[in-house]
Image (cartoon, helix red, strand yellow):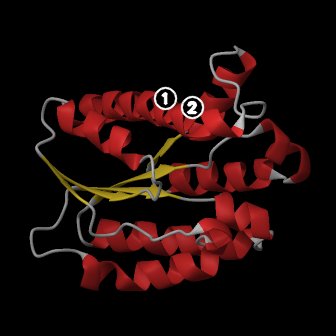
């Protein structure tokens, strides 16, 4: 199975290693990885640009699955929800037209960020667009919020010196959860 990841993170190695370790996953291509750099992350406008690049950036040996991380930059910037939904739908349509499976991953959870950013409307939009297009949405926000509520991980009160270690642990767990979803899908 070729897996094209669209997940940008300096901690993506644990995520990719978990995917590679799963049965049936033999090759990971990162041909569509957005190069998100801090506050200049991808919004609906730049997601549209990414969608336009999909045909060019896909290798000749097209992947069977694109994992597309969406929502955080749009929510932070307050991008119009209709524009956001339209950008998502354009990417979904392109993948479907090329017979490539697609999975969306919603944004990360942070209790502090959730107090100042209205994530709910974007989460609802991601779920609605995914449901209408029969696309699985990996509920990263809900998973991470549950971990926070259950004191599995404390994202907000971690000392700066421990953030990299915590992020690696979180991505390892997210990678395991996502790998389980993918494994169920390929059975």
In the structure shown, which secondary structural element does the residue marked by tag 1 occupy? helix
Of residues 158 and 141, the one nearer the viewer is 158
Estimate the spatial distance between the alpha carbons at disc 1 and disc 2, rounded to whole Å.
5 Å
* Pointer 1 with pointer 2, Cβ within 8 A: yes
Residue 183 location in percent, x, y? 25, 31
Q: Residue at x 69, y 40 (%)?
A: 160
Q: Would you place residue 174 above or below residue 13 in this image? A: above
Q: Would you place residue 90 above or below residue 69 in this image? A: below
Q: Residue at x 47, y 36 (%)?
A: 168
Of residues 162 and 57, the one nearer the viewer is 162
* Labelled disc at residue 183: none
Residue under pointer 1 = 169
Using the rendered image of the protein, determine whether residue 43 is visible from the camera's viewpoint: no
Q: Residue at x 33, y 78 (%)?
A: 54
Residue 45 location in percent, x, y? 61, 82
Residue 16 location in percent, x, y? 30, 44
Residue 150 location in percent, x, y? 70, 14
Of residues 36 and 140, the one nearer the viewer is 36
Q: Would you place residue 2 above or below residue 161 in this image? A: below
Where residue 87 sits, quadrant-wise, is: bottom right
In the structure shown, which secondary structural element does the residue marked by tag 2 occupy? helix
* Labelled disc at residue 166: 2
């Amino acid at each position: 199975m070729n897996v094209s990841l669209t997940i940008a993170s300096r901690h993506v190695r644990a995520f990719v290693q978990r995917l590679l370790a799963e049965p049936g996953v033999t090759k990971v291509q990162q041909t569509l990885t957005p190069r998100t750099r801090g506050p200049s992350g991808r919004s609906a406008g730049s997601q549209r640009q990414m969608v336009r690049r999909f045909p060019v950036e896909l290798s000749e040996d097209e992947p069977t699955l694109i994992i597309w991380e969406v929502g955080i930059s749009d929510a932070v910037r307050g991008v119009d929800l209709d524009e956001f939904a339209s950008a998502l739908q354009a990417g979904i349509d392109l993948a479907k037209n090329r017979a490539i499976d697609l999975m969306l991953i919603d944004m990360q959870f942070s209790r502090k960020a959730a107090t100042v950013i209205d994530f709910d409307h974007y989460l609802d939009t991601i779920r609605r667009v995914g449901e209408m297009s029969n696309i699985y949405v990996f509920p990263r926000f809900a998973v991470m919020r549950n971990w926070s509520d259950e004191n599995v991980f404390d994202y907000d009160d971690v000392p700066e010196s421990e953030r990299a270690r915590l992020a690696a642990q979180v991505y390892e767990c997210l990678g395991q959860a996502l790998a389980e979803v993918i494994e169920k899908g390929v059975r």
